[in-house]
Amino acid sequence: MSGFTHFDEQGRAAMVDVSAKPETERMATARGRVLMAPETLARIQQGQIGKGDVLGVARLAGIMAAKRTSDLIPLCHPLMLSKVAIDLTPAPPDTVEIEAVVKLTGRTGVEMEALTAVTVAALTVYDMCKAIDRGMRIEAVRLSHKSGGKSGTYEAG
């Protein structure tokens, strides 16, 4: 299984041994969005969703998810994150844009933590608004930037 780091010599799933890697500052940014009916976005902005502050709860859910990524993704290392920042930005008429920035100084990257943060924040928006808009769509979850480590910097095109 050449080229894949999460398989051993026999092709079995394995956690990567990062013990020999140097600690470096690592950062990842992920983005995504939730598309919805314009009326749903207006109600979010006006604080008229019965479950409460949609963007505030989704921000907290994203932060918590980044911290628990290794509990969700089987081969991820548990990490001591130094920063998790989530921005949820209404983009009228019908979108909430989500960005997560995750940082640490360590031996492995934080791409999965950033992607998990965006995804769970988006799912939280959906959960809090589904009673009024079941047609919402979570779209374009992707890594947009990564820096640090042996592979260096990545910028999405």
Image (tube, rainbow, N blue to C red):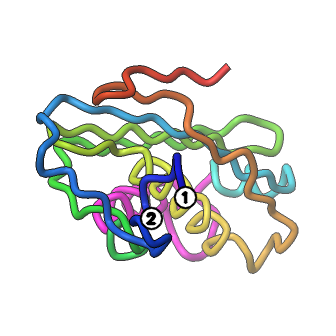
- Position of residue 105 relative to residue 151, above or below, is below
Q: SS of the residue at dot 1?
A: loop
Give left or right: position of 62 versus 124.
left
Q: Tell me which label, 1 or 2, sits earlier in the chain.
A: 1
Tell me the residue at 85%/49% (across/down): 38
Tell me the residue at 15%/54% (across/down): 80
- Measuring from the top left, give residue 151's x and y in whole percent: 39, 27
Amino acid type, residue under disc 1 in the picture? Met
- Measuring from the top left, give residue 35's x and y in whole percent: 79, 51
> What's the distance in space between the residues labelled 1 and 2, CA to CA?
7 Å
- Position of residue 4 relative to residue 76, above or below, is above
**Residue 67 sits inside the magenta stretch:** yes
State the image quarter where residue 95 is shown.
top right
Query: Residue 1: which disc?
Result: 1
**Residue 58 sits inside the magenta stretch:** yes
Give left or right: position of 153 versus 137.
left
Query: Which quarter shows the N terminus?
Result: bottom right
Q: Which residues are magenta?
A: 46-68
- Position of residue 71 relative to residue 156, above or below, is below
Query: Residue 7: which disc?
Result: 2
Give left or right: position of 5 versus 90.
left
Q: In the orientation shown, which residue stands out farthest toward the front? A: 10
- Measuring from the top left, give residue 122's x and y in whole percent: 60, 59
State the image quarter where residue 90 is shown.
top right
Task: Report the front residue among 135 and 73.
Answer: 73
Task: Report the front residue among 95 and 137.
Answer: 137
Instruction: Give the class, few, some or many, for how many residues have Cα within 10 Å of label 2's Cα (few <14, many ≥20).
Output: some
The reply to whether the C-beta atoms of the residues labelled 1 and 2 are less than 8 Å apart is yes
Q: SS of the residue at dot 2?
A: loop
Tell me the residue at 45%/42% (across/down): 100
